[in-house]
Amino acid sequence: MTSVIRTLGVIGGISWESTALYYRLINRAVASRLGGLHSAPLILHSLEFNEIAELQSAGKWDESGRILARSAMGLERAGAEALVMTSNTMHHVAAAIEDAVKIPLIHIVDPVGRLLNLAGMRMVGLLGTSYTMELPFWRDRLARQFGIEVLNPEAEDRQLVHRVIFEELCVGQVREASRKEFVRVSESLAGRGAEAVILGCTEVGMLLGPKDVTVPVFDTTELHAEAAVNFILSGAL
């Protein structure tokens, strides 16, 4: 009898590039743990990213929250027993999703925070969209629940990181020149006291990895996907 006991709902498409990473990571992990032809029981709703990106740019977070809440409700009706959202930025509206459904949302900050605590780290650098770096939702949750301080890149570097994410990674372009810039920004954060660098955008792992930086790198996509697999196989949140 299979030990896969939970169906996971995935709010994806933000972007589809990172959603594809989630799909691959989750299914490979389930297959690795269970063997044979096992795969993950997933229900995916892939959103139209341009609509969401325009709302982000306009600061219309309430409206984007309503769109994601409707997605969550649809996944719940379809049989999902928990939810993951394949975007760091849109966790800014996590409360709108949680208020709309009875099933849990596996929050992207939490598996990162738990691992940072295990590593004994207290100050980390964050790479993500300008929304993730500048809005309080990511750093506040990490500080409140895990006692960890976040360092952001300087303003000019925040603009660079944001541009690369939207203009390159979200459309599947991985450029060596941009990787070198991300390495430079990461090392600058380390020089200011960051004990690790958080890849706080679900596409950044396409460009930057642990071997590129002198401090430890924590990829939110990989850690979030691992948390999703833990739920699928055990029901643990």
Image (spheres, grey):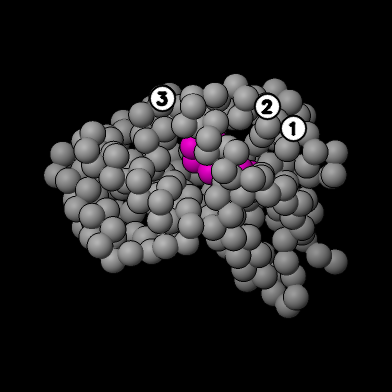
Q: Residue at x 40, y 26 (%)?
A: 135
* Cβ atoms under marks 1 and 2 closer than 8 Å: yes
Whichever of labels 3 and 2 marks the residue nearer the N terminus, that label is: 2
Which residue in the structure is indicated by mark 3?
136
Residues at marks 1 and 2, CA–CA distance in whole angstroms: 6 Å
Q: Which residues are magenta?
A: 84-90
Asked if residue 14 lies left or right of residue 43, the reply is left
Q: Mark on residue 66?
A: 2
> Could you tell me which quadrant the C terminus lies in?
top right
Q: Residue at x 67, y 70 (%)?
A: 31
* Residue 95 at least partly seen: no
- Disc 3 crowd, CA 10 A, few/some/many (<14, 14-19, 20+): few
Residues at marks 3 and 2, CA–CA distance in whole angstroms: 20 Å
Could you say which is closer to the camera, residue 194 or residue 34? 194
Q: Position of residue 232 (x, y in %)?
A: 71, 53
Which residue in the structure is indicated by mark 1?
70
Residue most extreme to the left: 191
Asked if residue 61 lies left or right of residue 8, the reply is left
Q: Position of residue 41 (x, y in %)?
A: 77, 58
Residue most extreme to the bottom: 36
Name the quadrant containing residue 97: top right
**For the residue marked with disc 1, what is the amino acid?**
Arg
Could you say which is closer to the camera, residue 150 or residue 19? 19
